[in-house]
Protein backbone atom coordinates (compact mmCIF):
# COMPACT_ATOMS: atom_id res chain seq x y z
CA UNK A 1 0.00 0.00 0.00
CA UNK A 2 1.52 3.35 -0.96
CA UNK A 3 1.39 6.51 1.13
CA UNK A 4 -1.42 8.14 -0.84
CA UNK A 5 -3.61 5.12 -0.24
CA UNK A 6 -2.76 5.07 3.43
CA UNK A 7 -3.57 8.77 3.73
CA UNK A 8 -7.01 8.14 2.25
CA UNK A 9 -7.44 5.33 4.62
CA UNK A 10 -6.51 7.21 7.75
CA UNK A 11 -8.96 9.89 6.67
CA UNK A 12 -11.86 7.50 7.23
CA UNK A 13 -14.31 8.58 9.92
CA UNK A 14 -14.36 7.48 13.51
CA UNK A 15 -17.30 6.04 15.37
CA UNK A 16 -19.56 7.24 16.84
CA UNK A 17 -19.85 10.37 14.66
CA UNK A 18 -19.12 13.76 16.17
CA UNK A 19 -20.96 15.94 13.62
CA UNK A 20 -23.56 15.87 10.83
CA UNK A 21 -20.80 15.73 8.28
CA UNK A 22 -19.27 12.75 10.01
CA UNK A 23 -22.66 11.11 10.10
CA UNK A 24 -23.04 11.41 6.34
CA UNK A 25 -19.75 9.64 6.00
CA UNK A 26 -21.16 6.66 7.84
CA UNK A 27 -22.40 4.84 4.83
CA UNK A 28 -20.89 1.56 3.77
CA UNK A 29 -20.40 2.73 0.19
CA UNK A 30 -18.42 5.77 1.32
CA UNK A 31 -16.34 3.64 3.62
CA UNK A 32 -15.72 0.82 1.16
CA UNK A 33 -14.57 3.18 -1.56
CA UNK A 34 -12.00 4.62 0.81
CA UNK A 35 -10.90 1.27 2.15
CA UNK A 36 -7.29 0.89 1.09
CA UNK A 37 -7.42 -2.85 1.83
CA UNK A 38 -10.54 -3.65 -0.17
CA UNK A 39 -8.70 -5.50 -2.93
CA UNK A 40 -7.44 -8.14 -0.47
CA UNK A 41 -10.94 -9.60 -0.27
CA UNK A 42 -10.38 -11.03 -3.76
CA UNK A 43 -7.52 -13.15 -2.48
CA UNK A 44 -9.84 -15.39 -0.45
CA UNK A 45 -12.44 -18.04 -1.14
CA UNK A 46 -15.80 -17.36 0.50
CA UNK A 47 -18.09 -20.25 1.47
CA UNK A 48 -21.63 -20.68 0.23
CA UNK A 49 -24.35 -19.17 2.36
CA UNK A 50 -27.47 -20.99 3.54
CA UNK A 51 -29.85 -18.74 1.61
CA UNK A 52 -27.83 -18.47 -1.59
CA UNK A 53 -27.11 -14.75 -1.06
CA UNK A 54 -23.58 -13.42 -0.87
CA UNK A 55 -22.29 -14.75 2.45
CA UNK A 56 -21.29 -12.54 5.33
CA UNK A 57 -18.32 -14.29 6.89
CA UNK A 58 -17.87 -13.13 10.47
CA UNK A 59 -16.28 -16.28 11.87
CA UNK A 60 -12.64 -15.64 11.07
CA UNK A 61 -12.15 -15.83 14.85
CA UNK A 62 -12.91 -19.53 14.55
CA UNK A 63 -11.61 -20.50 11.11
CA UNK A 64 -10.12 -17.94 8.76
CA UNK A 65 -10.96 -18.05 5.07
CA UNK A 66 -8.85 -19.93 2.57
CA UNK A 67 -6.36 -17.81 0.64
CA UNK A 68 -6.75 -18.68 -3.05
CA UNK A 69 -3.01 -19.22 -3.31
CA UNK A 70 -3.11 -21.95 -0.66
CA UNK A 71 -4.14 -24.54 -3.22
CA UNK A 72 -1.26 -23.64 -5.54
CA UNK A 73 1.27 -23.74 -2.72
CA UNK A 74 0.03 -27.07 -1.38
CA UNK A 75 -0.08 -28.46 -4.93
CA UNK A 76 3.50 -27.39 -5.42
CA UNK A 77 4.59 -29.50 -2.46
CA UNK A 78 2.48 -32.43 -3.65
CA UNK A 79 4.12 -32.18 -7.07
CA UNK A 80 7.57 -32.01 -5.54
CA UNK A 81 6.74 -35.01 -3.39
CA UNK A 82 5.61 -37.00 -6.46
CA UNK A 83 8.58 -35.89 -8.58
CA UNK A 84 11.38 -35.94 -6.05
CA UNK A 85 10.20 -38.03 -3.12
CA UNK A 86 12.82 -38.04 -0.38
CA UNK A 87 15.08 -35.70 -2.33
CA UNK A 88 12.52 -32.93 -1.94
CA UNK A 89 13.89 -32.41 1.55
CA UNK A 90 16.79 -30.73 -0.18
CA UNK A 91 15.74 -30.17 -3.80
CA UNK A 92 12.11 -29.06 -3.63
CA UNK A 93 11.43 -25.53 -4.89
CA UNK A 94 11.02 -24.75 -1.21
CA UNK A 95 13.24 -27.40 0.37
CA UNK A 96 11.53 -29.24 3.18
CA UNK A 97 14.43 -29.43 5.60
CA UNK A 98 14.39 -25.70 6.38
CA UNK A 99 10.71 -25.19 5.41
CA UNK A 100 9.61 -23.65 8.71
CA UNK A 101 12.26 -20.99 8.26
CA UNK A 102 10.38 -19.62 5.23
CA UNK A 103 7.64 -18.60 7.65
CA UNK A 104 9.69 -17.24 10.54
CA UNK A 105 10.16 -13.63 9.54
CA UNK A 106 6.54 -13.19 8.46
CA UNK A 107 5.09 -14.63 11.63
CA UNK A 108 7.56 -12.60 13.69
CA UNK A 109 6.12 -9.45 12.08
CA UNK A 110 2.57 -10.59 12.87
CA UNK A 111 3.30 -10.92 16.59
CA UNK A 112 5.83 -8.09 16.89
CA UNK A 113 8.88 -10.19 17.55
CA UNK A 114 12.40 -10.77 16.33
CA UNK A 115 12.87 -13.80 14.10
CA UNK A 116 14.94 -15.63 16.72
CA UNK A 117 11.97 -15.32 19.10
CA UNK A 118 9.41 -17.12 16.96
CA UNK A 119 8.86 -20.51 15.48
CA UNK A 120 5.97 -22.01 13.56
CA UNK A 121 5.27 -25.46 15.00
CA UNK A 122 2.63 -27.81 16.42
CA UNK A 123 -0.73 -26.57 17.59
CA UNK A 124 -1.57 -24.18 20.36
CA UNK A 125 -2.16 -26.40 23.37
CA UNK A 126 0.88 -28.53 22.54
CA UNK A 127 3.01 -25.39 22.42
CA UNK A 128 1.50 -24.17 25.66
CA UNK A 129 2.54 -27.40 27.35
CA UNK A 130 6.03 -27.27 25.89
CA UNK A 131 6.57 -23.74 27.11
CA UNK A 132 5.04 -24.33 30.52
CA UNK A 133 7.49 -27.19 31.00
CA UNK A 134 10.19 -24.55 30.67
CA UNK A 135 8.55 -21.51 32.22
CA UNK A 136 6.23 -22.75 34.92
CA UNK A 137 8.67 -23.52 37.71
CA UNK A 138 6.81 -23.60 41.02
CA UNK A 139 9.12 -23.22 43.98
CA UNK A 140 8.25 -22.88 47.65
CA UNK A 141 5.41 -20.41 48.10
CA UNK A 142 5.71 -19.19 44.52
CA UNK A 143 3.66 -21.80 42.72
CA UNK A 144 0.40 -20.20 41.59
CA UNK A 145 -0.75 -19.51 38.05
CA UNK A 146 -3.01 -16.55 37.31
CA UNK A 147 -5.57 -17.12 34.56
CA UNK A 148 -8.89 -15.54 33.56
CA UNK A 149 -11.99 -17.16 35.01
CA UNK A 150 -13.62 -18.42 31.85
CA UNK A 151 -10.31 -18.90 30.06
CA UNK A 152 -10.53 -21.17 27.04
CA UNK A 153 -11.00 -24.65 28.53
CA UNK A 154 -7.93 -26.12 26.84
CA UNK A 155 -5.73 -23.58 28.64
CA UNK A 156 -7.33 -24.42 31.94
CA UNK A 157 -6.85 -28.16 31.37
CA UNK A 158 -3.24 -27.59 30.35
CA UNK A 159 -2.45 -25.44 33.40
CA UNK A 160 -4.15 -27.78 35.86
CA UNK A 161 -2.45 -30.84 34.39
CA UNK A 162 0.94 -29.14 34.64
CA UNK A 163 0.22 -28.40 38.28
CA UNK A 164 -0.61 -32.04 38.92
CA UNK A 165 2.63 -33.07 37.22
CA UNK A 166 4.41 -30.93 39.82
CA UNK A 167 2.44 -32.69 42.58
CA UNK A 168 0.35 -29.56 43.20
CA UNK A 169 -3.36 -29.17 43.78
CA UNK A 170 -5.00 -26.81 41.23
CA UNK A 171 -7.59 -25.85 43.84
CA UNK A 172 -4.77 -24.26 45.84
CA UNK A 173 -2.60 -22.99 43.01
CA UNK A 174 -4.96 -21.57 40.44
CA UNK A 175 -5.78 -17.88 40.81
CA UNK A 176 -8.73 -16.99 38.61
CA UNK A 177 -9.41 -13.39 37.70
CA UNK A 178 -13.10 -12.54 37.62
CA UNK A 179 -14.89 -9.37 36.56
CA UNK A 180 -16.51 -7.28 39.28
CA UNK A 181 -20.14 -8.05 40.10
CA UNK A 182 -22.37 -6.75 37.35
CA UNK A 183 -19.48 -6.38 34.89
CA UNK A 184 -18.58 -8.67 32.01
CA UNK A 185 -14.91 -7.95 31.51
CA UNK A 186 -11.83 -7.44 33.63
CA UNK A 187 -10.39 -4.09 34.59
CA UNK A 188 -6.66 -3.81 34.01
CA UNK A 189 -6.30 -2.04 37.33
CA UNK A 190 -7.90 -5.02 39.10
CA UNK A 191 -5.57 -7.45 37.32
CA UNK A 192 -2.53 -5.41 38.29
CA UNK A 193 -3.73 -4.99 41.86
CA UNK A 194 -4.25 -8.70 42.25
CA UNK A 195 -0.78 -9.45 40.86
CA UNK A 196 0.70 -6.94 43.28
CA UNK A 197 -1.21 -8.21 46.29
CA UNK A 198 -0.36 -11.90 45.76
CA UNK A 199 2.96 -11.35 44.02
CA UNK A 200 4.98 -13.70 46.23
CA UNK A 201 2.71 -16.63 45.39
CA UNK A 202 2.65 -16.19 41.64
CA UNK A 203 4.95 -18.26 39.44
CA UNK A 204 3.18 -17.58 36.16
CA UNK A 205 0.64 -15.10 34.77
CA UNK A 206 -1.04 -16.72 31.77
CA UNK A 207 -3.80 -14.79 30.04
CA UNK A 208 -5.36 -14.74 26.63
CA UNK A 209 -4.31 -11.86 24.41
CA UNK A 210 -8.02 -11.57 23.63
CA UNK A 211 -10.60 -13.49 25.65
CA UNK A 212 -12.38 -15.87 23.30
CA UNK A 213 -15.80 -15.31 24.89
CA UNK A 214 -15.98 -11.59 25.66
CA UNK A 215 -13.60 -10.37 22.96
CA UNK A 216 -11.73 -8.32 25.57
CA UNK A 217 -8.13 -7.57 24.58
CA UNK A 218 -5.89 -7.48 27.60
CA UNK A 219 -3.42 -4.68 28.12
CA UNK A 220 -0.46 -6.96 27.73
CA UNK A 221 2.23 -4.37 28.23
CA UNK A 222 0.90 -3.29 31.64
CA UNK A 223 0.17 -6.84 32.73
CA UNK A 224 3.63 -8.02 31.73
CA UNK A 225 5.24 -5.18 33.67
CA UNK A 226 3.14 -5.99 36.74
CA UNK A 227 3.95 -9.70 36.50
CA UNK A 228 7.66 -9.04 36.21
CA UNK A 229 7.61 -6.58 39.11
CA UNK A 230 6.12 -9.35 41.21
CA UNK A 231 8.87 -11.73 40.12
CA UNK A 232 6.62 -13.90 37.94
CA UNK A 233 6.91 -15.19 34.39
CA UNK A 234 4.31 -13.80 31.98
CA UNK A 235 2.88 -15.72 29.02
CA UNK A 236 -0.03 -15.15 26.64
CA UNK A 237 -2.33 -17.32 24.60
CA UNK A 238 -2.62 -15.33 21.39
CA UNK A 239 -5.21 -17.57 19.70
CA UNK A 240 -7.57 -14.61 19.24
CA UNK A 241 -4.90 -11.94 19.06
CA UNK A 242 -2.44 -13.10 16.37
CA UNK A 243 -3.39 -11.53 13.05
CA UNK A 244 -5.99 -9.43 14.86
CA UNK A 245 -4.21 -6.94 17.14
CA UNK A 246 -1.04 -4.98 16.66
CA UNK A 247 1.19 -6.98 18.95
CA UNK A 248 4.61 -6.05 20.31
CA UNK A 249 5.67 -9.21 22.06
CA UNK A 250 9.34 -8.27 22.08
CA UNK A 251 8.99 -4.67 23.21
CA UNK A 252 6.44 -5.50 25.87
CA UNK A 253 8.94 -7.98 27.30
CA UNK A 254 6.53 -10.92 27.37
CA UNK A 255 8.35 -14.13 28.34
CA UNK A 256 6.50 -16.51 26.06
CA UNK A 257 3.39 -16.76 23.91
CA UNK A 258 1.61 -19.34 21.81
CA UNK A 259 -1.03 -19.12 19.09
CA UNK A 260 -2.86 -21.15 16.51
CA UNK A 261 -2.70 -20.68 12.78
CA UNK A 262 -6.30 -21.33 11.79
CA UNK A 263 -8.16 -18.27 13.08
CA UNK A 264 -7.13 -14.78 11.97
CA UNK A 265 -3.89 -16.17 10.58
CA UNK A 266 -5.89 -18.06 7.90
CA UNK A 267 -3.60 -21.08 7.76
CA UNK A 268 -6.42 -23.62 7.31
CA UNK A 269 -8.10 -26.26 9.48
CA UNK A 270 -5.72 -27.59 12.13
CA UNK A 271 -3.06 -25.21 10.80
CA UNK A 272 0.36 -25.16 12.37
CA UNK A 273 0.51 -22.81 15.33
CA UNK A 274 3.45 -20.91 16.69
CA UNK A 275 5.44 -19.95 19.72
CA UNK A 276 7.28 -16.90 20.94
CA UNK A 277 10.12 -17.01 23.45
CA UNK A 278 11.66 -13.70 24.37
CA UNK A 279 15.23 -13.15 23.23
CA UNK A 280 16.46 -12.95 26.81
CA UNK A 281 15.68 -16.66 27.13
CA UNK A 282 17.14 -17.53 23.70
CA UNK A 283 20.26 -19.08 25.16
CA UNK A 284 18.86 -20.37 28.41
CA UNK A 285 19.92 -23.88 27.53
CA UNK A 286 19.62 -25.04 31.11
CA UNK A 287 15.84 -24.53 31.12
CA UNK A 288 13.93 -27.73 31.57
CA UNK A 289 12.51 -28.69 28.17
CA UNK A 290 11.05 -31.61 26.31
CA UNK A 291 13.60 -32.32 23.64
CA UNK A 292 13.34 -33.71 20.12
CA UNK A 293 15.64 -33.82 17.14
CA UNK A 294 14.14 -30.80 15.34
CA UNK A 295 15.14 -28.60 18.26
CA UNK A 296 18.70 -29.84 17.98
CA UNK A 297 21.55 -27.84 16.47
CA UNK A 298 21.08 -27.87 12.66
CA UNK A 299 24.77 -28.31 11.92
CA UNK A 300 25.01 -31.58 13.79
CA UNK A 301 21.44 -32.90 13.68
CA UNK A 302 22.21 -35.51 11.06
CA UNK A 303 25.33 -36.74 12.78
CA UNK A 304 22.75 -38.52 14.89
CA UNK A 305 24.71 -38.15 18.12
CA UNK A 306 23.14 -39.09 21.44
CA UNK A 307 23.55 -35.73 23.16
CA UNK A 308 20.87 -33.06 22.71
CA UNK A 309 22.22 -29.63 21.84
CA UNK A 310 19.29 -27.16 21.60
CA UNK A 311 19.13 -24.47 18.97
CA UNK A 312 19.20 -20.90 20.24
CA UNK A 313 15.84 -19.14 20.38
CA UNK A 314 12.32 -20.39 19.87
CA UNK A 315 13.45 -22.99 17.33
CA UNK A 316 15.07 -24.87 20.17
CA UNK A 317 11.62 -25.86 21.41
CA UNK A 318 10.78 -27.79 18.23
CA UNK A 319 10.44 -31.50 18.65
CA UNK A 320 9.47 -33.19 15.40
CA UNK A 321 9.97 -32.50 11.72
CA UNK A 322 7.13 -30.28 10.51
CA UNK A 323 4.03 -30.89 8.35
CA UNK A 324 5.00 -29.41 4.99
CA UNK A 325 1.52 -29.42 3.41
CA UNK A 326 0.08 -27.45 6.31
CA UNK A 327 2.98 -25.07 6.24
CA UNK A 328 2.50 -24.50 2.52
CA UNK A 329 -1.05 -23.29 3.13
CA UNK A 330 0.19 -21.06 5.93
CA UNK A 331 2.88 -19.64 3.67
CA UNK A 332 0.18 -18.48 1.25
CA UNK A 333 -1.56 -16.65 4.04
CA UNK A 334 1.53 -15.09 5.58
CA UNK A 335 2.48 -13.61 2.21
CA UNK A 336 -0.75 -11.62 2.38
CA UNK A 337 0.07 -10.41 5.90
CA UNK A 338 3.48 -9.31 4.61
CA UNK A 339 1.83 -7.25 1.93
CA UNK A 340 -0.77 -5.63 4.17
CA UNK A 341 1.19 -5.17 7.40
CA UNK A 342 -0.37 -5.20 10.85
CA UNK A 343 -0.52 -1.39 11.12
CA UNK A 344 -2.86 -0.97 8.16
CA UNK A 345 -4.84 -4.04 9.12
CA UNK A 346 -5.44 -2.71 12.59
CA UNK A 347 -6.43 0.71 11.28
CA UNK A 348 -9.11 -0.84 9.12
CA UNK A 349 -10.16 -3.15 11.91
CA UNK A 350 -10.77 -0.27 14.31
CA UNK A 351 -13.13 1.33 11.81
CA UNK A 352 -14.85 -1.84 10.73
CA UNK A 353 -15.62 -2.97 14.27
CA UNK A 354 -16.48 0.57 15.34
CA UNK A 355 -18.99 0.72 12.48
CA UNK A 356 -20.50 -2.61 13.47
CA UNK A 357 -20.77 -1.51 17.08
CA UNK A 358 -22.56 1.72 16.16
CA UNK A 359 -25.05 -0.05 13.87
CA UNK A 360 -25.84 -2.71 16.47
CA UNK A 361 -26.38 -0.03 19.11
CA UNK A 362 -28.67 1.82 16.70
CA UNK A 363 -30.95 -1.24 16.56
CA UNK A 364 -31.73 -0.41 20.17
CA UNK A 365 -33.20 -3.78 21.12
CA UNK A 366 -33.09 -4.41 24.86
CA UNK A 367 -32.62 -8.16 24.32
CA UNK A 368 -29.14 -7.66 22.95
CA UNK A 369 -26.11 -6.02 24.51
CA UNK A 370 -22.47 -5.94 23.51
CA UNK A 371 -20.26 -7.24 26.31
CA UNK A 372 -16.98 -6.55 24.51
CA UNK A 373 -15.36 -3.36 25.85
CA UNK A 374 -16.36 -0.26 23.92
CA UNK A 375 -12.80 1.08 24.27
CA UNK A 376 -11.20 0.12 20.92
CA UNK A 377 -7.87 -0.39 22.68
CA UNK A 378 -9.43 -3.19 24.67
CA UNK A 379 -10.75 -5.25 21.82
CA UNK A 380 -9.79 -6.65 18.45
CA UNK A 381 -12.28 -7.12 15.64
CA UNK A 382 -14.69 -9.38 17.56
CA UNK A 383 -17.86 -8.17 19.23
CA UNK A 384 -19.65 -10.51 21.61
CA UNK A 385 -23.38 -9.89 21.66
CA UNK A 386 -25.14 -11.15 24.76
CA UNK A 387 -28.71 -12.19 24.08
CA UNK A 388 -31.02 -12.23 27.07
CA UNK A 389 -33.59 -14.63 25.59
CA UNK A 390 -33.76 -16.95 22.60
CA UNK A 391 -30.09 -16.46 21.75
CA UNK A 392 -29.55 -19.83 20.16
CA UNK A 393 -32.60 -19.46 17.93
CA UNK A 394 -31.50 -15.96 16.97
CA UNK A 395 -28.10 -17.31 16.00
CA UNK A 396 -29.71 -19.98 13.83
CA UNK A 397 -31.82 -17.35 12.08
CA UNK A 398 -28.72 -15.29 11.33
CA UNK A 399 -27.01 -18.30 9.81
CA UNK A 400 -30.12 -19.11 7.78
CA UNK A 401 -29.99 -15.58 6.40
CA UNK A 402 -26.44 -16.06 5.16
CA UNK A 403 -24.56 -14.55 8.11
CA UNK A 404 -21.74 -16.69 9.46
CA UNK A 405 -21.29 -15.97 13.15
CA UNK A 406 -21.11 -18.32 16.11
CA UNK A 407 -22.90 -19.14 19.29
CA UNK A 408 -21.06 -19.68 22.56
CA UNK A 409 -22.89 -21.01 25.58
CA UNK A 410 -24.48 -19.73 27.67
CA UNK A 411 -25.60 -16.52 25.97
CA UNK A 412 -23.28 -15.03 23.39
CA UNK A 413 -23.25 -14.60 19.63
CA UNK A 414 -19.73 -13.78 18.48
CA UNK A 415 -19.26 -11.70 15.35
CA UNK A 416 -15.84 -10.93 13.96
CA UNK A 417 -15.48 -8.75 10.88
CA UNK A 418 -11.94 -9.67 9.87
CA UNK A 419 -10.38 -6.65 8.15
CA UNK A 420 -8.42 -8.68 5.60
CA UNK A 421 -11.51 -9.82 3.76
CA UNK A 422 -14.59 -8.16 5.25
CA UNK A 423 -16.11 -4.96 3.93
CA UNK A 424 -18.19 -2.17 5.42
CA UNK A 425 -21.02 -3.44 3.26
CA UNK A 426 -20.77 -6.81 5.05
CA UNK A 427 -21.16 -4.95 8.33
CA UNK A 428 -24.15 -3.00 7.12
CA UNK A 429 -25.82 -6.11 5.72
CA UNK A 430 -25.18 -7.99 8.96
CA UNK A 431 -26.82 -5.31 11.07
CA UNK A 432 -29.83 -5.24 8.73
CA UNK A 433 -30.20 -9.00 9.01
CA UNK A 434 -29.81 -8.84 12.78
CA UNK A 435 -32.55 -6.23 12.94
CA UNK A 436 -34.86 -8.36 10.77
CA UNK A 437 -34.17 -11.48 12.82
CA UNK A 438 -34.96 -9.65 16.05
CA UNK A 439 -38.19 -8.20 14.65
C1 LIG B 1 -8.15 -19.18 23.25
C2 LIG B 1 -7.86 -20.56 22.75
N1 LIG B 1 -6.92 -21.29 23.36
C3 LIG B 1 -6.65 -22.55 22.97
C4 LIG B 1 -7.31 -23.12 21.90
C5 LIG B 1 -6.99 -24.53 21.52
O1 LIG B 1 -6.23 -24.58 20.36
P1 LIG B 1 -5.59 -25.94 19.78
O2 LIG B 1 -6.70 -26.86 19.44
O3 LIG B 1 -4.86 -25.49 18.54
O4 LIG B 1 -4.69 -26.49 20.80
C6 LIG B 1 -8.29 -22.39 21.22
C7 LIG B 1 -9.02 -22.97 20.10
O5 LIG B 1 -9.92 -22.43 19.52
C8 LIG B 1 -8.57 -21.08 21.67
O6 LIG B 1 -9.52 -20.33 21.09
Image (cartoon, rainbow, N blue to C red):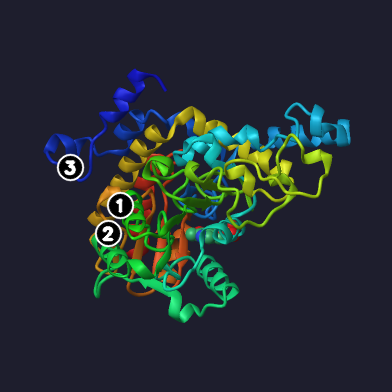
Image location of residue 188, percent across then percent down? 27, 59
In the rendered view, tell whether residue 48 sits above or below residue 434: above
Q: Which mark is residue 63?
A: none
> Mark 1 or mark 2: which comes first in sequence?
2
Q: Residue at x 49, y 51 (%)?
A: 257
Dividing the image into four quarters, tell me where ligand 1 lies.
bottom right
Residue found 71% across the figure and 44% down from its top: 296
Residue at image location 52% in from the left, 58% down from the top:
135
Relative to residue 136, is residue 331 drawn left or right? right
Q: Which residue is mark 2?
A: 188
Q: In the image, which is nearer the foreground, mark 1 or mark 2?
A: 1
Q: Position of residue 295 (x, y in %)?
A: 68, 46
Secondary structure state at the residue bearing disc 1: helix
Q: CA distance from mark 2 to mark 3?
A: 27 Å
Measured as percent of width and height from the top left, residue 255 is found at 46, 50
- How many marks do you count on the picture? 3
Q: Are marks 1 and 2 in contact (CB under 8 Å)?
A: yes
Q: What residue is pinned by disc 1?
A: 222
Q: Is 277 left, or right, of 15 in this rendering?
A: right
Marks 1 and 2 sit apart, C-alpha to C-alpha, by 8 Å
Check disc 3 and report the residue beneath it. Answer: 17
Q: Residue at x 41, y 54 (%)?
A: 209
Give the x, y percent position of residue 29: 33, 34
Amino acid sequence: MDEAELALFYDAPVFPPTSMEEELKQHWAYLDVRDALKSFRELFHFPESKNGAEPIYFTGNSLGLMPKKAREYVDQELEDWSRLAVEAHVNARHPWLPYHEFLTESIARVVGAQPIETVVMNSLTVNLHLLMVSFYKPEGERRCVVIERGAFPSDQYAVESQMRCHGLDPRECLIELAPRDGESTLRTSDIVEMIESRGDEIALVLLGGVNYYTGQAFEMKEITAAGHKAGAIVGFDLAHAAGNLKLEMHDWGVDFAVWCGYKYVNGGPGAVGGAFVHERHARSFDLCRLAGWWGHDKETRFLMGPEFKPLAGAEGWQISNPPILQMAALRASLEIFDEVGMDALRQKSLRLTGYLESLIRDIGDARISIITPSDPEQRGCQLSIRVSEGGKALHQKLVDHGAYCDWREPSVIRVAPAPLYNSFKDVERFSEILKQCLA
